[in-house]
Amino acid sequence: MQKRTKSRMRACLLVVSAFFSMSNCSAESPKSSPLKQIDRAALEKVISATAKEMMIPGAVVLLHTPQGAFKINYGSTKLGAATAPNALTHFRIASNTKTMTAALIMLLAQEKKLKLDDLISKYVSGVPDGDKITIANLLEMRTGLYNYTSAPEVAESIDHHPTKVWTDKELLAIVCKHPTTAPDKTFHWKYNYNNTNYFLLGLVVEKVGGMPLRQAMQERLFKPLHLSDTQLPEASSNKIPEIYSHGYLYGSSSVALAGIPPYSAKFKADAKAGKILPKDYSDVNHSFAAAAGGATSTAADCATWISALCTGSVLNPEYQRLWLNSLRLEDPSNAAGMEYGYGISRLHWAKNAFLFHGGETVGYNSFIGFDPANKVTLIVWTNLTVSLDELPTANTLMLKVLDHIYVESPIPSAKH
C-alpha cells in the first residue's frame, strides 16, 4: 500500500491527540489563560532553528493573538538569493483550496440550489458508485474513490512535462478506471483523505453555479472578503503572481503526491552534504489540482480567509452550524483523535482545539488554522514540501509555534 502524503501530516498530529487522551496533565483553572506571554525573540529563534535543521529555504509564520500580531520570516524566496519572504509573498496553498471549494458547495446548499444528500451521479456521470456517493460523502472524505493524484501518470507528467494543461476529462478518466474500495455492509466508507472528492465537488460547483470555478471563487469568496492576493489561476497558466516564492522538493514529484519513493540513506547524506539540491517546482501547471489544491495566496490573505470562515462571515448561522457539526472522528476507535468535516479539520490537545487545514504540493507546504476559544489565527508556509526525514515542513513549524504560545504544549515530549 502506498504511503499517502497526507498521512505524514496526520501521523504527526495523531501522536499529539493520542498523548493527550492518556495524559494526566493537570487541567487549566477556569481563570487562567491557556496562552503564555509570547516572547517574540524566543519564537523567532525557535522558528529559525527548526527551519535550518529541516533545510527549508524560506518560511513565513503569521500569528494573530489577543497579544497582537507576530510576523516572522525566515530565509529566502529563492535558493541562492537574498530576498526574504513575508506575509504578502505569493505561494501555492495546495489543499487549503479545499476549504474554499467546500464553502462554495455550502453556499449553493444554503441557497437551495443543491442538497448535501444529492448523489454525485446527478451532476457527474461515470463516477464509480456514483449512484451511492453523496455530496456530503465527498465533502467529508468518505467515498472509497481512487485518489487520482496517486496515479503514476500524474507524477510522470509533472516531472517531465510540468507545463502540461490537464483537462477535467483527463482527470475524470483516471478516476473512472478504478473501482471504489469496499464499503461496509450498510454501504458506508471509512474516512480516507482523497483529492478526487474535491475535484468532483469543483465540477458540481461549475454545473450548479453556472460559472467556471475560478470565477465562482473570485466573485463569491475572494471579492467579498477583499482577498485581492488570492486566486485560482487559469488552467492554462503555470505562473504565480508577483511577488512570489519559488518552491522546492528533493526528488520526484511522487514524493509529494504519493509519498514514494522514500529517501534512501545515501540520498539523505548526499543532500545534507550539498551534493544534491532540491528541484525548483514553482513553474508546474496546477490544472491537475484545481478545486482540490490549485489556488495561490499570501499569508495575510490566508489569515483573513480562515478567520472569516470559522467565525461565520461566509455562511449564514444555520449553515455555519451545519459546517461545524460536520466534524467527525477520522478513526472512530480513537475518541481523542483528529476530526474531519466539510473541508475542515479539528485538532484537540488538553483543553485547546484548532480548526485548520493543511496544504502540500510540489514545492510548498502550508497550514492555516484558527482557535475560536482563544482567538488565535496561525498561518505557516514553507517553500520545501517535506524535509529529508520526510516530515511536512509547515506542520512541524506549526507544532513548534503552538508549543511556544500555549501553556499546555501539543508536543508530547514537552514539559507540562
Image (spheres, rainbow, N blue to C red):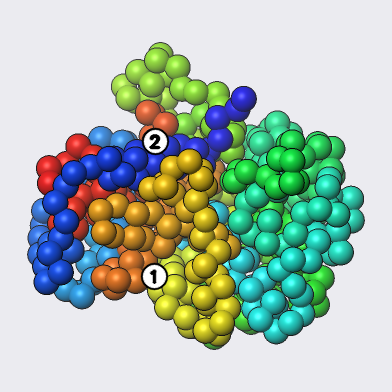
- The residue beneath circle 1 is 303
Q: Where is residue 35 in the image (x, y as percent from the top left)?
A: 17, 64
Q: Position of residue 37 (x, y in %)?
A: 10, 64
Q: Which mark is residue 391?
A: 2
Q: Where is residue 227 in the image (x, y as percent from the top left)?
A: 49, 77
Q: Can residue 85 be seen in this view?
A: no
Q: Quadrant of the N terminus?
A: top right
x 25%, y 35%: residue: 53
Q: Which of 145 and 274 is in front in this view?
A: 145
Element at label 1: helix
How many numbered circles are shown?
A: 2
Element at label 2: loop
Q: Nearer the viewer, residue 106 or 335?
A: 335
Image quarter for residue 267?
Answer: top left
Position of 269 relative to 29 (above/below)? above
Q: Position of residue 101 (x, y in %)?
A: 63, 66
Q: In this view, does 207 lie to the left or right of 34?
A: right
Q: Nearer the viewer, residue 277 or 226?
A: 226
Q: Is residue 6 left or right of residue 416?
A: right
x 56%, y 82%: residue: 318
- Neighbor class of circle 2 (other Cα within 10 Å; few <14, some 14-19, many 20+) is some
The type of residue carrying mark 2 is: Leu
Seen as rendered, the residue at the extreme top is 266
Q: Is residue 140 visible?
A: yes
x 58%, y 68%: residue: 100
Marks 2 and 1 close (CB-CB < 8 Å): no
In space, the residues marked 2 and 1 are separated at their CA atoms by 24 Å
